[in-house]
Every structure is written in structure tokens, then in C-alpha cells.
């Protein structure tokens, strides 16, 4: 599936809507360049799943150290 969004907010909203289609045991694989919106998508997905914790990029944390 390929979807193009035009803003971070749009990407988060897509993730939130996508969460409604997930079932227990679902596996997602995201790939893309740095800054392509993977973490932003997951932030919306988490919100849709009712997750309240802050979602940050694992790559950013790795590079920051």
C-alpha cells in the first residue's frame, strides 16, 4: 500500500484511522528515509489505539547519543 500525505497532521490522522483496521497479533513493517514520517504515522496509530505514552523515533535516540 502506498499513501501520500501532505502534512504531519494528515500523516497522524492516517495512522489513527489505520488503527481501526488492526486486529490482535497484527504486524506492521514501516520503512523509509529519515524524516519520511514513520514516527509521525505511529504517533497517530498509537493515539487511535488509546496509547497515551509519548512516541519518539528510535533512530533519533540512537543518533542523539
Image (tube, rainbow, N blue to C red):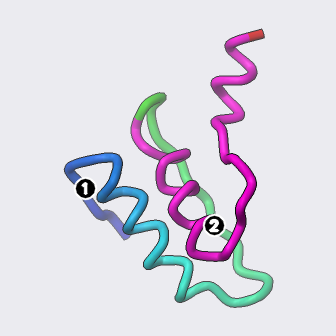
Q: Where is residue 33 drawn, in percent x and y?
A: 45, 32
- Relative image position of residue 8 (x, y in whole percent): 34, 47
Where is residue 40? Give x, y as percent: 48, 48
The span picked out in magenta is 36-64
Q: Secondary structure at mark 2?
A: loop
- Per the picture, the main secondary structure of the magenta-coloured stretch is helix
Residue linked to disc 2: 28
**Quarter occupied by residue 28:** bottom right
Q: Judge left or right: residue 38 versus residue 47.
A: left
The reply to whether the magenta stretch includes residue 62 is yes
Specify few, some or many for label 2: CA neighbours under 10 Å numbering under 14, 14-19, or 20 or more.
few
- Quadrant of the rendering where the C terminus is positioned: top right
Q: Is residue 10 left or right of residue 20?
A: left
For the residues carrying marks 2 and 1, which lies nearer the camera in this image? 1
Residue located farthest toward the front when viewing the structure as drawn: 52
Taking the spot 48% from the left edge, 72% from the top edge, the residue there is: 16
Image vertical order of residue 41 relative to residue 32, above or below = below
Which of the marked residues, 2 or 1, is nearer the chain's N terminus?
1
- The residue positioned 57% from the left and 74% from the top of the image is 48
Question: In percent of the image, x 44 and y 78: which residue is there?
Answer: 17
Residue matched to label 1: 5
Q: Where the N terminus falls, by quadrant?
A: bottom left
Q: Secondary structure at mark 1?
A: loop
- Mark-to-mark CA distance, 2 and 1: 19 Å
Q: Residue at x 56, y 66 (%)?
A: 45
Q: Is residue 49 magenta?
A: yes
Q: Nearer the viewer, residue 64 or 2?
A: 64
**Side (left or right) of 62 relative to 49:** right
Q: Looking at the rendered structure, which numbered label has been put on residue 24?
A: none
Query: From the viewer's perspective, is residue 62 above or below residue 9?
Result: above
Query: Would residue 49 appear left or right of 13 to someone viewing this image?
Result: right
- In the foreground, 48 or 4: 48
Amino acid at each position: 500500500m502506498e499513501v501520500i500525505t501532505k502534512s504531519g497532521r494528515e500523516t497522524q490522522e492516517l495512522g489513527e484511522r489505520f488503527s481501526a483496521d488492526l486486529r490482535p497479533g497484527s504486524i506492521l513493517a514501516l520503512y523509509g528515509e529519515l524524516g519520511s514520517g514513520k514516527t509521525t504515522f505511529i504517533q497517530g496509530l498509537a493515539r487511535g489505539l488509546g496509547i497515551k505514552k509519548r512516541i519518539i523515533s528510535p533512530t533519533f535516540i540512537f543518533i542523539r547519543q
